[in-house]
Amino acid sequence: MATYIVLMGMQGAGKGTQAAILSKRLGLPHVTTGGLFRAMEGQDSELAREIQAIMKRGELVPDHITIEVVRQRLAKPDAAQGAIFDGFPRTLPQAQALDALLAELDGQVSLVPLLTLDRKEAIARISARWECTLDPTHVYNLRTNPPKVPGICDIDGAPLRQRPDDTPEAAAKRIDTFFEKTAPLLDYYRQRGVVHEVDASQSIEAVSAALFKLIEANQSA
Ligand code: AMP
């Protein structure tokens, strides 16, 4: 049975960092819609330009586009055994669409870890965040997880950059959107008993250890 895990939590809670760790350890792809959209940067199409403009404003990309991007990602062979979702779903229609997509694959969301963090700490983390220009799943934080060589990705040696939507204004807007549009999703998943809170103010290692414990308990349940 394939394993589908949805990491939830406000921006800056460490979903990307933890999804990358889980992905490596479980051998499942890290499906990040934000990363997939950022990979479209520079593409010469109306859609790609519109998406970059939406992201820069800290708004959500329309559901139908987001769902289609995920549908295409899940169709790739590496997702046959499951996936770790980071930043998706973010709205109720997206969660319902994900259920429908997974039902076609005879699967379902089995675990929704919620990484909890206060807003002030989240904004501080976002301002210190840098990502790899080659692979947006390689994420660093100048305070808590700096690269070995400043400005260079440890994994592939590519230059790092700050995300255009990590300005304090766009970050604050994204966190507001999280409370308005994404937090209500938790009730949807809570009704199924799959949501488990993890204190994201802990170290990266302590958060991953808590996540692995949850996953083990979930697999043996
Ligand atoms: P993230 O990397 O998850 O912070 O996402 C960066 C930006 O990509 C968001 O602020 C949105 O503009 C867009 N985005 C990412 N995931 C989604 C999603 N599931 N639904 C709508 N927009 C998204």
Image (cartoon, grey):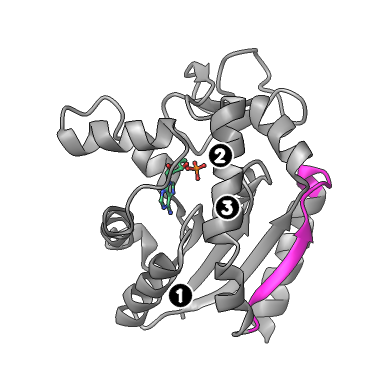
What's the magenta region?
A: 193-205
Q: Which image quadrant for residue 186? A: bottom right
Find residue 2 and name its label.
1
86 in relation to 146, above or below: below
**Which residue is nearer to you in this view: 136 or 1?**
136
Q: Is residue 44 above or below residue 206?
A: above
Decide whether residue 197 is among the magenta residues: yes
Task: Kindly identify the amino acid type of the residue bearing the numbered disc 2.
Answer: Lys
- What residue appears at the point 59 percent right and 59 percent down from the top-left corner? 7
Question: Which residue corresponds to the image point at 78% horizontal and 47% vertical from the top-left?
Answer: 118
Left or right, 26 with reference to 93: right
Kind of residue at badge 1: Ala
How dense is the environment of label 1, judged by Cα within 10 Å: few (below 14), some, or many (20 and up)?
some
**In magenta stretch: residue 164:** no
- Residue 195's x, y, as percent? 66, 73
Dot 2, how many residues are within 10 Å of its Cα: few (below 14), some (14-19), or many (20+)? some
Secondary structure, mark 3, is helix
Q: Residue furthest left?
A: 45
Residue 26 in view, yes or no = no
Residue at x 57%, y 67% (from the top left corner): 184
Frontmost of labels 1 and 3 is 3
Instruction: State which quarter of the image contains the C terminus.
Output: bottom right
* Tag 2 residue: 173
Q: Earlier in the sequence, mark 3 or mark 2?
A: 2
Determine the CA span between mark 1 and mark 3.
Answer: 28 Å
**Residue position marked by numbered label 3 in the rendering:** 178
Nearer the N terminus, badge 2 or badge 1?
1
